[in-house]
Image (cartoon, rainbow, N blue to C red):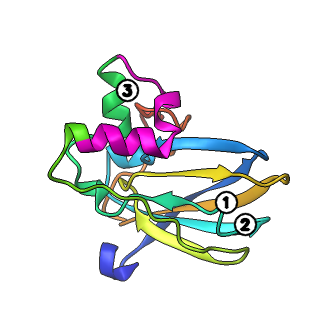
């Protein structure tokens, strides 16, 4: 983490994720990183298998548009970003020189992934049990960090 943020690191938040059996979480970026740079940690807690772990799109933090940008420009919804093949097709059409791809590291309970907050990510839980994970949020203490009221874009946060 110090490679991404430096030696002075602030953990400012955590989120518990429960994903229902047979469900998908659409491709997205972490809301709060619309306003400051940071790192997210995704920690497998319960019923995490390689098939239900977080999916990542390498180098997508450098894409000119986020999933939320596509949605806010009209004509697309979060549901449009639930299908991997549909998302890859859209990116190949809209950004042909980027060569987007999806990776899903083989994470189990007690293991974690660390990534830049603006990296595109999503998940699926193809199992018959609820999958539990934690999201830990980090930034540098020189940033004015505000806890979001919602995970939806744009972030709604307190003004003070």
Between 150 and 51, which is closer to the camera in this rendering?
51
Q: Image height check: is 35 above or below 77?
A: below
Residue at x 51% of width, y 59% of height = 55
- Answer above or below: position of 46 versus 65: below
Q: Which quarter of the rendered picture does the C terminus lie within? A: top left
Find the magenta span and give its range. Answer: 75-92
Can you give x and y, in whole percent of width and height, for residue 98 in the image?
20, 54
Badge number at residue 48: 2
Give coordinates of residue 82: x percent, y percent: 53, 38
Q: Residue at x 62, y 73 (%)?
A: 107
Residues under labels 1 and 2: Cα distance? 6 Å
Whether residue 83 is visible to the viewer of this picture, yes or no, is yes
The image quadrant that residue 39 belongs to is bottom left
Question: Which of pointers 3 and 1 lies earlier in the amino acid sequence?
Answer: 1
- Inter-mark Cα distance, 3 to 1: 25 Å
For disc 1, the marked residue is 52
Residue that mark 3 sits on: 71
44 or 14, nearer to the observer: 44
Q: Are marks 3 and 2 in contact (CB under 8 Å)?
A: no
| 145 vs 135, nearest the viewer | 135
Foreground residue among 116 and 71: 71
Q: Is mark 1 in CB contact (under 8 Å) with mark 2?
A: yes
User: Looking at the image, is mark 3 or mark 2 earlier in the sequence?
Assistant: 2
Q: Which residue shows up at 63% across the image and 43% down it?
A: 24
């Amino acid at each position: 983490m110090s490679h991404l943020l430096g030696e002075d690191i602030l953990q400012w938040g955590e989120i518990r994720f429960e994903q229902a059996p047979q469900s998908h979480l659409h491709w997205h970026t972490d809301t709060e990183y619309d306003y400051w740079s940071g790192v997210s940690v995704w920690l497998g807690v319960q019923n995490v298998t390689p098939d239900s772990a977080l999916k990542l799109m390498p180098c997508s933090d450098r894409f000119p548009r986020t999933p939320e940008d596509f949605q806010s420009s009209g004509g697309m919804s979060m549901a449009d970003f639930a299908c991997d093949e549909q998302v890859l097709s859209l990116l190949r059409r809209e950004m042909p020189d980027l060569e987007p791809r999806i990776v899903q590291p083989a994470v189990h309970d007690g293991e974690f992934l660390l990534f830049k907050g603006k990296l595109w990510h999503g998940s699926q839980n193809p199992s018959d049990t609820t999958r539990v994970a934690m999201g830990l949020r980090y930034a540098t203490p020189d940033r004015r960090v505000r806890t979001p009221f919602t995970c939806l874009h744009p972030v709604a946060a307190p003004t003070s």
